[in-house]
Amino acid sequence: MPATTHLLYLHGFRSSPRSAKARMVAERVARDHPAVTFWCPQLPPSPRQAMAMVAGGIAGWPRAAMAVIGSSLGGFYAGWVAQRMRCPSVLLNPAVDPARDLARYIGEHPVWQSPEERVFFRAEYIDELRALDVRGEPPAAPAFAVIAKGDEVLDWREMAARCAHARLRLLDGSNHALDDFASQIDEVFDFLQLAR
């Protein structure tokens, strides 16, 4: 795989570019890979709008030299981006069936990193999530999944089965937020092969 010159990071539900993992990745890219274009957008709650924004933002990126990282719902989105762009992906505790799992979250919720900010998840977003589901498609590019058996939100077995095509790092403990991501980041960056 050629050196990656463009890296996209997609945060999860009720998260933001200020999440610990997103900041760690951004800092590592800035410090060790200053030639790499890094983008971690604040995603709108509408899945359709989120992916339209992402598609527009990466439209000029070189497909052969880009990669995507996604966490939780961002991991679901990263699967869609990887299929469409045929690029490598890193999936961090990726949501497998968010149309099913987020149906109970319709309504207003605080953003994890800033509780004063709110996100409103609408009923119509469930169908938008279904439209982005790529589970029936064969993998388009290499993937690396980091999955915590200690995830308190998503079932690690379901995630591992969904990521059977991927290089898999199963963590015996940890949690949904991957609070120990600092111990996984080297392997993530080894997989990504970022340009120097």
Image (cartoon, grey):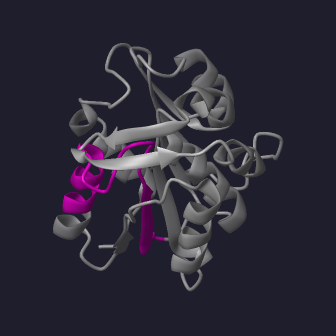
Residue drawn at the location 41% of the way across and 16% of the way down: 152
Instruction: Say whether residue 164 is visible.
Output: no
Question: Which residue lies at the image location 51% right of the left edge and 63% below the top edge?
Answer: 67
Left or right: where does residue 162 sit relative to residue 159?
A: right
At 66% across and 67% down in the image, what residue appears? 85
- The residue stretch that appears in magenta: 3-28
Q: Position of residue 125 (x, y in %)?
A: 65, 47
Residue 43 falls inside the magenta stretch: no
Q: Position of residue 54 (x, y in %)?
A: 54, 69
Relative image position of residue 169 (x, y in whole percent): 45, 29
Query: Is residue 162 shown above or below 23?
Result: above
The answer to whether residue 65 shows anywhere in this view is yes
Question: Which residue is found at the position 67% from the left and 36% from the top?
Answer: 99
Residue 180 in the figure: left or right of residue 68: left
Give residue 8's position: percent from left, percent from top. Answer: 44, 64
- Pick the residue in front: 195 or 93: 93
Q: Name the side, left or right, on which 30 lies relative to 100.
A: left
In the image, 175 versus 126, the foreground residue is 126
Image label count? 0
Residue 10, magenta (yes or no): yes
Residue 7, image quadrant = bottom left
Q: Quadrant of the N terminus?
A: bottom right
Decide: is 27 above or below 30. Answer: above
